[in-house]
Amino acid sequence: MTIHIKNLEIYAIIGILDAERVSKQKIIVDMKILYDYNKNNFINYADISNLVEKIIIKSKFLLIEDALLIIQKEIIHLYPKMEELEIEIKKPDIIPNCIVSISKKWIF
């Protein structure tokens, strides 16, 4: 099975610019989780969405790269039987004429 979490919108302090350290900005997270589903092994996508939101809001990261790695670490800790995990974090409003993002995919 594959879980897709798309356009998870979070408002948080994140970034290295002075303005980013005082005002919340919109962050968008997309995730893809591949795992071997059975009735005794399922992943609760609502729990993952809530976890990601809490991590980003609480941590006030300087770099979205650090946010991505911490999110990956926490999800793997909670769901070690995943086969693949892909995360993309977007900052849609930081540059007026584009959306910047980082992403990474892990295969276990």
Image: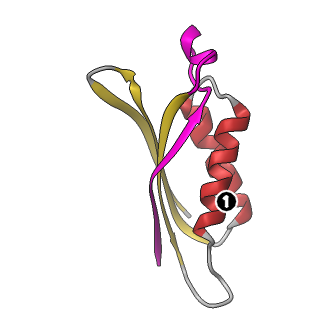
Residue 25, visible in the rendered structure: yes
Give the x, y percent position of residue 68: 57, 41
Give the x, y percent position of residue 32: 46, 61
- In the rendered structure, which segment of residues is drawn in magenta? 1-24
- Residue at 68 percent across and 88 percent down: it is 40
Dot 1 falls on a residue whose secondary structure is helix
Give the x, y percent position of residue 107: 51, 61
Residue lying farthest to the bottom in this orientation: 39
Residue 50 drawn above or below residue 42: above
Residue lying farthest to the top in this orientation: 18
* Nearest to the observer: residue 26 or residue 91: 26
- Dividing the picture into quadrants, the one containing residue 103 is top left
- Residue at 61 percent across and 65 percent down: it is 46
- Residue at 67 percent across and 59 percent down: it is 76
Amino acid type of the residue that numbered disc 1 sits on in the rendered structure: Ile
Q: Is 6 one of the magenta-colored residues?
A: yes
Q: Which residue is mark 1?
A: 76
Give the x, y percent position of residue 56: 64, 39
